Image: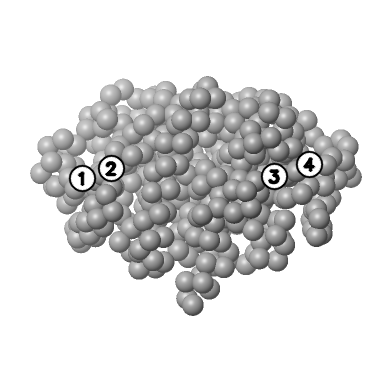
């Protein structure tokens, strides 16, 4: 699967950060992780720090899949609002998922600072705009639902938005618990720490066959060498593999662009993360070198060639949306790109053991919250592998829909 077009901003900005070897001889380990993006990085760091022998394998160069295409807005909300998610799953699970998202942001901040990973992590507010007049009632319900479970939110009315931002929206939901990061630098920083703790990180090696047995899993590769592991973790994200259990999902193509460096933006002094209630929605943030990064314009899955042909038109669309929010902003589009992501039916990730092979585990952060889901996946899988269980495992398991229905 072609996860992205060839010019995502993070790769162009950072260049080749580290070199990693490929697989030249057969290895044995406790855990083999397939996927060297942000999800694989979180999991490998967590397990290597716990003293396990870890091998990370990626068929590309490390971090150059979906991670480089991410706009890296760290938000605790899932794509389904809390007041609706409570009805789709159950109130307890919906509340827990939202709280796990908040915990994930704090944990990513703590970890990146403790490990001294230079990844541009910064705390921000999150501002969700009512795209249409009728969406105001939806945001009012969402504010009420979050306040019921003790979350800190504010509903900003039309007068305040006009006075402080110069916008004409009916209202906006503001939360103080959000952040931004450079996902490419964070991925490499975490993997470097995992290497210091003994993990082997190997790129440009493709797993061609997975052979699970009662005692271990044998991975065959295009290099001829093999990896035998007690457990195998698939951190392949949106690139579904033949070994992934069947899920109710859909593939979406999305688009993003980054501007040149711009001066102070009137109405955006707090550099909050901005998104909207419409579906599909736009989402935007500042970068730590004073650019504007905006994404959206999603369409149903397209071939890579069709998707990439749409980049100029989608870039122009995103530029128009940015100018509509900030009419006095003068900018040029520096880079534009496209990528693919997967949406699950209930907006939750799939994390846990394969229903068929207990030694095969998955961390699939489907939806618009891939980075917070990556952290949650690392915590859940570490519990399953190290301790044999995790209290949140059933909430993200592959059989959750069947259990909810029963």
Disc assigned to residue 175: 2
Whether residue 139 is visible to the viewer of this picture, yes or no, is no
Residue neighbourhood size for the residue with mark 3, other residues' Cα within 10 Å, grouped as few (<14), some (14–19), many (≥20): many
Q: Earlier in the sequence, mark 2 or mark 1?
A: 1
Give the number of the mark in front: 4 or 3: 4
Q: From what the image shows, is residue 374 above or below residue 164?
A: below
Compute the Cα span from label 4 to label 3.
Answer: 10 Å
Disc 2 to disc 1: CB gap under 8 Å: yes
Q: From what the image shows, is residue 118 above or below residue 204?
A: above
Disc 2 to disc 4: CB gap under 8 Å: no
Residue neighbourhood size for the residue with mark 2, other residues' Cα within 10 Å, grouped as few (<14), some (14–19), many (≥20): many
Compute the Cα span from label 2 to label 4.
Answer: 43 Å
Q: Nearer the viewer, residue 204 or 107?
A: 107
Disc assigned to residue 29: 4
Question: Pointer 3: what residue?
Answer: 33
What residue is rendered at 59% in x and 48% in y? 383
For the rendered model, the colour scheme is one colour
- For this view, does 76 lie left or right of residue 38? left
Q: Residue 298, percent across and down?
A: 45, 54
- For this view, does 101 lie left or right of residue 382? left
Disc assigned to residue 154: 1
């Amino acid at each position: 699967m072609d996860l992205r077009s060839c010019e995502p901003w993070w790769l162009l900005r950072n260049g080749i950060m580290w070199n990693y070897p490929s697989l030249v001889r057969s290895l044995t380990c406790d855990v083999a992780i397939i996927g060297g993006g942000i999800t694989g990085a979180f999991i490998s760091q967590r397990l290597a720090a716990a003293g396990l022998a870890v091998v990370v394998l990626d068929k590309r160069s490390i971090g150059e899949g979906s991670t480089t295409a991410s706009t890296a807005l760290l938000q605790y909300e899932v794509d389904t609002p809390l007041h609706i998610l409570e009805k789709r799953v159950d109130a307890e699970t919906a509340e827990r998922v939202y709280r796990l998202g908040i915990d994930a942001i704090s944990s990513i901040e703590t970890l990146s600072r403790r490990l001294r990973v230079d990844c541009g992590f910064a705390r921000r507010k999150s501002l969700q705009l009512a795209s249409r007049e009728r969406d105001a009632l939806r945001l009012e319900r969402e504010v009420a639902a979050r306040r019921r479970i003790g979350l800190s939110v504010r509903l900003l009315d039309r007068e305040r938005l006009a006075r402080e931002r110069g916008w004409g929206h009916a209202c906006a939901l503001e939360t103080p618990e959000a952040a931004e990061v450079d996902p490419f630098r964070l991925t490499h920083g975490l993997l470097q720490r995992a290497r210091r703790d003994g993990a082997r990180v190997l790129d440009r090696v493709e797993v061609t066959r997975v052979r699970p047995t009662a005692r271990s899993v044998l991975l065959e590769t295009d290099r001829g060498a093999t990896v035998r592991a007690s457990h195998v973790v698939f951190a392949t994200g949106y690139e579904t593999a033949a070994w992934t259990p069947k899920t109710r999902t859909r593939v979406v193509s999305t688009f993003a662009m980054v501007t040149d460096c711009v001066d102070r933006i009137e109405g955006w002094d707090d550099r909050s993360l901005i998104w909207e209630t419409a579906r599909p929605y736009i989402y935007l943030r500042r970068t730590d070198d004073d650019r504007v990064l905006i994404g959206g314009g999603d369409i149903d899955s397209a071939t890579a060639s069709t998707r990439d042909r749409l980049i100029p038109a989608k870039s122009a669309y995103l530029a128009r949306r940015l100018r509509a929010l900030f009419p006095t902003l003068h900018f040029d589009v520096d880079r534009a790109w496209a990528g693919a992501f997967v949406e699950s039916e209930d907006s939750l990730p799939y994390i846990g053991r394969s229903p068929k092979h207990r030694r095969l585990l998955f961390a699939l952060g489907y939806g618009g919250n891939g980075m917070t889901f990556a952290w949650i996946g690392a915590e859940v899988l570490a519990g399953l592998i190290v301790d044999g269980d995790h209290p949140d495992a059933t909430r993200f398991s592959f059989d959750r829909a069947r259990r909810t229905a029963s």
